[in-house]
Amino acid sequence: MKIFGKNYDDKKVKKIVYTAIYVAIALWFVYRFVMVAVESRMDVFNPIRVAQSDGVLVETMVAKRQDDFIKIPIDIKNNRAYVSGDSYNNLKAGQKVESGEIISVSSSIDLDTGMHVVRTRGAGDGVRYVSIKKNGYFVPLYAVRNGSVMVKDGETAVARNITIVAKDSEYACVVGDLQDGDVIILSKVTAGQKINVK
């Protein structure tokens, strides 16, 4: 084989070409390993790494037992409303329904709807709200998961068992293993997870 005017043996040329290819591949692997090592040492923002070292960023509120109102919506038509068992437990005759009042709450379930019948006077048709005064810890409904709320304990989240006394579309009045001053975690976390309070 003639290269640049010189004669070379085919075996010798093949050996040189293959050696060059092997050296190029070896250099490429060394380069990739070095670059991976350099990249892993760089301070690149990695939310998972930050969450593991600094803790998951969470929103919180401080627990304080208090008297407050839960607003239960009832849909009234011709001075009659149908409510579920949850609402039934919090309704009774004499309670105000905006400008009107409840005159009776059936303890038996209506067979057609499977709900309790509430009779009103002077409330008008449409969705009306019954304000019920309760005593407990008022937390956003989304912070209650499977009968518990998450509480800050040092740098970790721990679950505290609670019971919902009453709830509306936004808040739940709860009692249970909470005390005034506990820091309730509003963000979604799991028990034992390291947290970082905003």
Image (cartoon, rainbow, N blue to C red):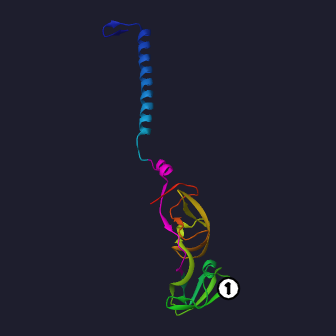
Q: Quadrant of the C terminus?
A: bottom left
Q: Position of residue 164 (x, y in %)?
A: 60, 73
Q: Residue at x 58, y 91 (%)?
A: 94
Q: Is residue 146 magenta?
A: no
Task: Say above or below: 82 vs 180.
Answer: below
Q: Position of residue 180 (x, y in %)?
A: 55, 71
Residue with the mark numbered 1 = 107
Which secondary structure lies at badge 1?
strand
Q: Looking at the image, how many numbered discs can be counted on the residues?
A: 1
Task: Say above or below: 30 vs 48.
Answer: above
Q: Residue at x 50, y 85 (%)?
A: 126
Q: Residue at x 33, y 6 (%)?
A: 6
Q: In this rendering, would 23 be left or right of 157?
A: left
Please name the amino acid that badge 1 sits on: Ser
Q: In this rendering, would 163 be left or right of 181?
A: right
- Quarter location, residue 11: top left
Residues 171 and 74: in front is 171
Q: Which residues are magenta?
A: 46-72
Q: Position of residue 47 (x, y in %)?
A: 46, 50
Extreme-left residue of the structure: 5
Q: Position of residue 136 (x, y in %)?
A: 57, 76
Q: Quadrant of the N terminus?
A: top left
**Could you classify mark 1 by the number of other residues whose Cα lies within 10 Å: few (under 14), some (14-19), or many (20 or more)?**
few
